[in-house]
Image: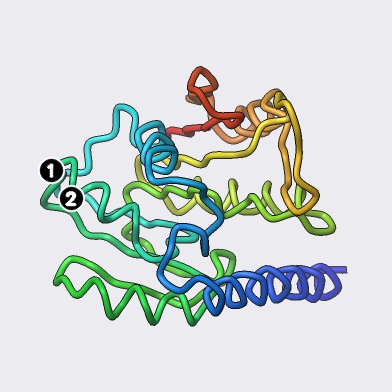
Amino acid sequence: MQKNLFKMKNFNLNKVKKYYNKKFELFGNSIKTIGWSNRKDQYLRFEKLVYNYNFKNKTILDVGCGFGDFYKYLILKKRTNFQYIGLDISEKILIEAKNKIKKSNVTFINSDLLNFKHNKIDYSVSSGALTYEFKNSNEYAKKIIKKMYEISNISCSINFMSTYCDYKLKKNQHYSPEKIFKFAKSLSPKVNLIHDYDLFEFTIQIYK
């Protein structure tokens, strides 16, 4: 059973990887490649992800980092003295990220989270990595949430497209805030659900 699940996971990730590699070929280093409509909304997502987080002297893992826009956001907001690790399954997007961001506190790794091993992560964040819809995407999302929680010494933070919305695109996966919150509470008693901002999305923070 475990082998079958592993094969299913790889198939799904290959589909997602091909999708984003193709988007990069079409749009290059653009916010359109990673599926966002504008920078303002992207930065609003980042703002909710880091709510009450103190990154000073900490290591941050950015799951589905794309071009490293989250790192750029932290610098813009004058967050300093942290180590940043960007993780992404699209090798084409990561090559671009490595070429554009060359800092001593930044590392980019081409890998999926479930095969990633690191024992010094303080915070892990993920913005938009669970947006693309595929078979068993809800179960895959739970695996990602659990892994992010397990490897984070302090907290993990993830945003999701919400089922509370006006419309849905076929390619997108929307999640029930209630179900995600319930699953998060099965991992930790310390959970923060943020669903009060002007996007049809929500953010979940899970603390150790």
Q: Quadrant of the N terminus?
A: bottom right
Tell me how many marks there are. Answer: 2
Q: Position of residue 127 (x, y in %)?
A: 49, 48
Q: Residue at x 18, y 53 (%)?
A: 82
Residue type at mark 1: give it: Lys
> From the viewer's perspective, is 147 left or right of 182?
left
Mark 1 — residue?
A: 78
> From the viewer's perspective, is 22 left or right of 4?
left
Q: Is residue 83 above or below residue 77?
A: below
The reply to whether callout 1 and callout 2 are in contact (CB within 8 Å) is yes
Q: Residue at x 62, y 77 (%)?
A: 22
Mark 2 — residue?
A: 75
Q: Is residue 138 above or below residue 71?
A: above
* Mark 2 closeness class: few <14, some 14–19, many ≥20 residues within 10 Å: few
Q: In this orientation, which residue lies closer to the viewer: 166 or 187?
A: 166
Q: In this orientation, which residue lies closer to the viewer: 49 or 190?
A: 49
SS category of the residue bearing label 1: loop
